[in-house]
Image (tube, rainbow, N blue to C red):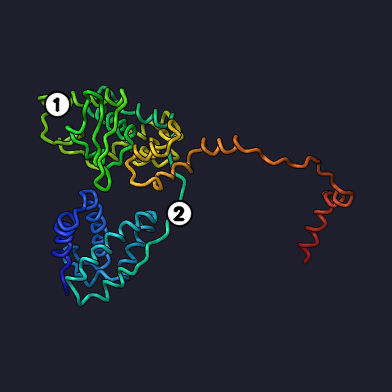
Amino acid sequence: MTPIAPHITAFLQQRLPIERGASVHTCDSYAYAFKLLFEYAGTCLKVAPSALQFEQIDAPLVLRFLNHLENGRGNRQTSRNTRLAAIKSFMHFMEYRTPRALNQIRQVIAIPMKKADTRLVRHLTLAELQSILRAPDPTTRDGIRDRAMIHLCFAAALRVSELVGVRLDDVTFQPSPSVLIRGKGRRERCLPLWKETVKALRAWLALRRLPEQPTLTPELFTNARGAAMSRSGFEYILCKHVQTATRVCPSLSKKRVSPHLLRHTSALFTLQATRDLRKVSLWLGHSSLQTTEIYTRADQSIKLEILESAVAPKLRSGRFRASDKLIPSLRPHNFMRSRTSGNCL
């Protein structure tokens, strides 16, 4: 038997960041995938995660874990495939470390990815977005911080990892306000800021730099303990303000508002304003226009332009006239007679 703990440590600390040059976000995603896997395996096998053996992580266990993600945790196919990709990458890493387990490794690698449904992008209306932005209390420290976070997340169409990763020196107010974003795939982009966003950021920075509340954290947004804001921390803050905004805008109760929903909303607003998919792709930091095309399916204004530019074919006019045989059959006593005969049968 082969203890899995030293191998997973080498994979996350040596293989990914040093040998493959993976980003911090990729390492965090892989680490979270194995956290879920080991917790599930420990529960099923009734052993501590630190005592798991590599031979116990076989194909049947991985398949049960993937089913647990979809049925137990309510994850979609895309999240399921992301966890499976992390497991397969680790199995490729173990091929040269444990050759005697090649059959087990090949069985896990052979597990196919599941096809995901292509759904329309969910987004917020302008009224719903405005109610969320107005939910934080601007007379409190936390309210000023939350308002700046939510406004920047929407204005720059940020992923939650990009938002919490923004540092103090990434924000520039002179000569023109802008923010430097370190995005997915190690791609950096510099985005200009609205005056409203600058105003919200200046208000937060004025409180963050107070001498009575010093913090050495380089990140722009901090939590109540002075540490860097986490992804789960911002998700909790957003959920709290959505609940407050629901009292003013009841339609929010029917939507699952997440940080990524703000990104989708910003992308659709940008597409409607510019009518240029390339500008939307540039704003979002996508590596390919094919990724950005999902927003064209959700934008109704583009489809309305198609209707307005096309001429609908004419239909032949006329009115339906019932025949003499049809009218008698529609009398009530005919239906009662057929129902009575059916009961007798």
- Please tell me which residue is depicted at 17% across the width and 54% down the height of the picture: 17
- Secondary element at tag 1: loop
Q: What element does badge 2 sit on?
A: loop
Quarter of the picture holding the C terminus: bottom right
The quadrant holding residue 274 is top left
Which residue is tagged 2? 117
Question: x%, y% of residue 8?
Answer: 18, 62
Q: Nearer the viewer, residue 33 or 40?
A: 33
Q: What type is the residue that disc 2 sits on?
A: Asp
Q: Nearer the viewer, residue 294 or 12?
A: 294
Provide residue 16's location: percent of width, then percent of height: 19, 57
Pick the front one: 137 or 27: 27
Instruction: Kindly check if marks 1 and 2 are in contact, taking CB atoms under 8 A apart as contact.
Output: no
Q: Residues within 10 Å of mark 1 (few under 14, many from 20)?
A: few
Q: At x 25% / y 24%, what residue is drawn? A: 176
Q: Residue at x 19, y 53 (%)?
A: 21
* Type of amino acid at the residue the image marks with label 1: Arg
Please give the label number shown on residue 13.
Answer: none
Residue drawn 42% across and 28% down? 248
N-term-proximal mark, 1 vs 2: 2
Q: Residues within 10 Å of mark 2 (few under 14, many from 20)?
A: few
Q: Nearer the viewer, mark 1 or mark 2?
A: 2
Q: Is the residue 121 above or below the residue 80 in the image? A: above
Give coordinates of residue 267: x percent, y percent.
39, 37
- Give the residue furthest to the right: 324
The residue indicated by pointer 1 is: 209
In this rendering, is residue 112 above or below 123? Answer: below
